[in-house]
Amino acid sequence: MFIGKISVNGFKNLKDVEMEPHERLNILCGRNAQGKTNLIEAVWLCTGARSFRSTKDRRFIGDDEQVMDIGLSFKNNFRQQDIRFSMAKPNIREKNVFLNGVKLKTPSKLFGNLNCVIFTPEDLELSKGSPDNRRQFLDLSVSQIKNNYAHVAAKYENVLEQRNVLLKNIAFGRADREQLEVWDVQLAHMGAYISLLRYNYTKKLNVFAKKLYYEISDRQEELDIAYSSTVYPNELLQKSTDYTGGLTEHYLRTLKNNIEDDIRAGFTQRGAHRDDMTAKINGKNAREDASQGQHRSIALILKLSQAYILEEEIDDFPVILLDDVLSELDPSRQRFVISKIHGMQVFITCCDLNIPFGKKDGRLFMIEGGRVTAGDGETNR
């Protein structure tokens, strides 16, 4: 899979951008705050995912602009496709998203078409950061191969919020606990679905991660990745092929058995929203014992494994977006990452060209003041 054309105007500081990327390597070079990451973000939005920078919708349109428009053409193993994403002030809630000329209800309907894997400096904290970051990583990864998953996950969060409000009202005598039933049934159904898909994805992740980590550690260390559920023992998830029936019933029983504790706490203490993904190096818990370098290696391996699982699922390489990541890595890890994304289309942002690529390997774009020019100084149009 590769992107053949990109056009962006009015998205943050980007103006009149017209690019024809190289099928393999694309270096986006410029000083800080010139628009490099904005360009990566514009591409990322065309996958159907939310902004990796948590940008609010109202910030998509530049301060001096009334309209933002992103256009993108890409080709996979089967055909060329076109995506258009636009918004206008003052009605920023209306997102006009088109796939091959057909208007979609929401940007999330783009999932499963343009497949990208993004590496950011924040991702290097994936291993030692909060469980919430790892849950988001799993949810995004599963969403890329299960189109309905993002919708279920969003609905789960909404139901969870309603249940937590009700728990507080019960604690203050403003509601009856019988009212929990309707929320518990929904939460159990969706929570079982989320837990099983995350567990199955983590099993695949572990297969790739184990092999890659063994290599990056010079065959000195073994990595094991596992899903840690607050509801299920792993044996139950391991033998389950369907989230309905036994898994849903077990989830519902867990909610009911913890009602008293939940009321006292004022929130739901067990469920998919409290689960985690754990890592062990040579049998030791990575969060407690890993060095900074080991944490960074784990994070890189997780993102590379995400790319390989996507390739296995869709029978095509995803597009790789490296946003100022290589400058954060030592030379050995730089070389490792580069060797593992060989053959994929790659976009790399950097402030200088002190990275282990040459212009002959692909195409260089300079970015200044939100405008993009070809590396030789001519506008790439």
Image: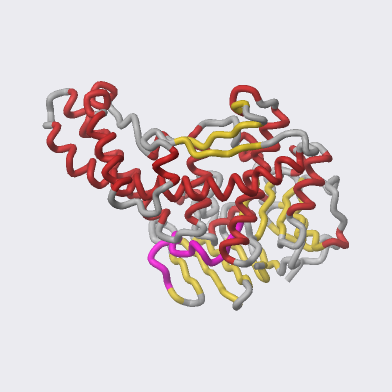
Q: Is residue 39 visible?
A: no
Number of numbered discs overlaid on the protein picture: 0
Q: x%, y% of residue 368?
A: 73, 52
Residue 291 falls in image quadrant: top right
- Quarter placement of the C terminus: bottom right
Q: How is the image coloured?
A: secondary structure
In the rendered image, the vertical position of residue 381 relative to residue 152, given as above or below: below
Q: Is residue 105 magenta?
A: yes
Using the image as rendered, state which of residue 237 and residue 36 is in the foreground. 237
Q: Position of residue 88 (x, y in %)?
A: 45, 61
Q: Nearer the viewer, residue 81 or 317?
A: 317
Seen at 27% across and 33% down, the residue is 164
| Residue drawn at x 48%, y 55% as measured from the top left | 143
Q: Is residue 186 magenta?
A: no
State left or right for residue 12 relative to residue 216. Answer: left
Q: Is residue 267 above or below residue 378?
A: above
Residue 13 is situated, as x and y percent measured from the top left of the image, at 61, 53
Residue 133 horizontal side relative to residue 332, left or right:
left
Q: Write the residue at 18% across / 37% down.
A: 180
Image point 68% across, 42% down: which residue?
A: 300
In this image, 278 relative to 241: left or right?
right
Which picture quadrant has residue 185? top left
Part of the protein shown in magenta: 103-116
Q: Indicate the position of residue 231 as horizontal and vertical percent values.
A: 36, 36
Which of the two residues, 231 or 171, is positioned nearer the viewer here? 231
* Picture layout, residue 276 above or below residue 242: above
The reply to whether residue 217 is in sight is yes
Tell me the quadrant of the picture where the N terminus can be found: bottom right
Identify whether 142 is placed above or below 286. below
